[in-house]
Image: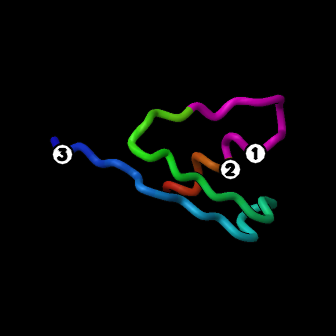
Amino acid sequence: MNDYRIKAMKLQNFCGIQSLEITPDGADISVYGDNATGKTTIANAFA
C-alpha cells in the first residue's frame, strides 16, 4: 500500500465553504468543531 501526503488543499465555494486553505507542511492536522460547522464537508472534499 502506498502512503500519500497532502501538501496543500484549497477550497472555494464548495458546499457552503466560501474559502479554506490548509497547508499541513508534513504535520498531522485535526479537524474539530461544533456540529454543523463543516467538518464532514472538508472530509467530502477528498471523495
Q: Residue at x 49, y 45 (%)?
A: 24
Find disc 3 in the rendering and name its residue.
Answer: 2
For the residue carrying disc 3, how many other residues have a C-alpha within 10 Å: few (<14), some (14-19), or many (20+)? few
The magenta region covers: 30-40
Q: What amino acid type should be assigned to the residue bearing mark 2?
A: Thr
**Residue 14 found in image quarter:** bottom right
Q: What amino acid type should be assigned to the residue bearing mark 3?
A: Asn
Find disc 1 in the rendering and name its residue.
Answer: 38
Q: Residue at x 58, y 31 (%)?
A: 30
Let me know if residue 34 is in the magenta part: yes
Q: How is the image coloured?
A: rainbow
Q: Which quarter shows the N terminus?
A: top left
Percent coordinates x, y for residue 12 in the rendering: 70, 69
**Residue 39 found in image quarter:** top right
Q: In front: 43, or 3?
A: 3
Numbered disc 2: secondary structure: helix
Q: In front: 37, or 10?
A: 10
Percent coordinates x, y for residue 19 in the rendering: 75, 63
Residue furthest to the front in view is: 25
